[in-house]
Amino acid sequence: MPGFVLLVRERGDGSAAMRVGFTVTKKIGNAVVRNRMKRRLRALARELLPQGGVAGADHILIGRNGGIERDYDALRRELAKALRKAAA
């Protein structure tokens, strides 16, 4: 099970700009753990969205249990795979 869920929604407003949002619920842990997870998700998005994201769409990354313990490289591979699926 991946450490996050990726939702991609076309905006349909004619703009090619990609937007990204992050959410991590209190089920994941206290504020320190949630903020650490959001920082990891932001770093992944900064790294992979410019090349693999869907133009003109909103990308929402939802942190899940186990995401904070996962290896960063594993998260990167999972996000790259999810972006390829979303683009298809």
Image: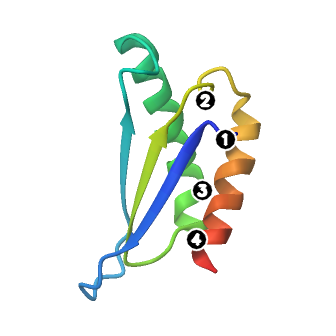
1 or 2: tag closer to the N-terminus: 1
Q: In the rendered structure, which amino acid carries the disc numbered 4? A: Ala
How packed mark 2 is, by other alpha carbons closer than 10 Å (few <14, some 14-19, many 20 or more), is many
Secondary structure under tag 1 reads loop
Residue under numbered circle 3: 48
Q: Earlier in the sequence, mark 4 or mark 1?
A: 1
**57 sits to left or right of 85:** left
**Could you tell me how far apart the alpha carbons at marks 2 and 4 are, in whole angstroms?**
20 Å
Going by the numbered disc 1, the residue's amino acid type is Pro
Q: Which quarter of the rendered picture does the N terminus lie within? A: top right
Q: Which callout, 3 or 2, points at the residue further toward the start of the chain?
A: 3
Q: Label 2's element? A: loop
The amino acid type of the residue labelled 2 equals Gly
Local secondary structure at mark 4:
helix
| Nearer the camera: disc 3 or disc 2 | 2
Q: Which mark is residue 31?
A: none
Q: Which residue is mark 2?
A: 67
Label 4 crowd (10 A; few <14 / some 14-19 / many >=20): some
* Cα–Cα span, label 3 and label 2: 17 Å
Percent across and percent down for residue 53 are 53, 68
User: Residue at the location (37% across, 28% down)?
Assistant: 25
Q: Which residue is mark 4?
A: 86
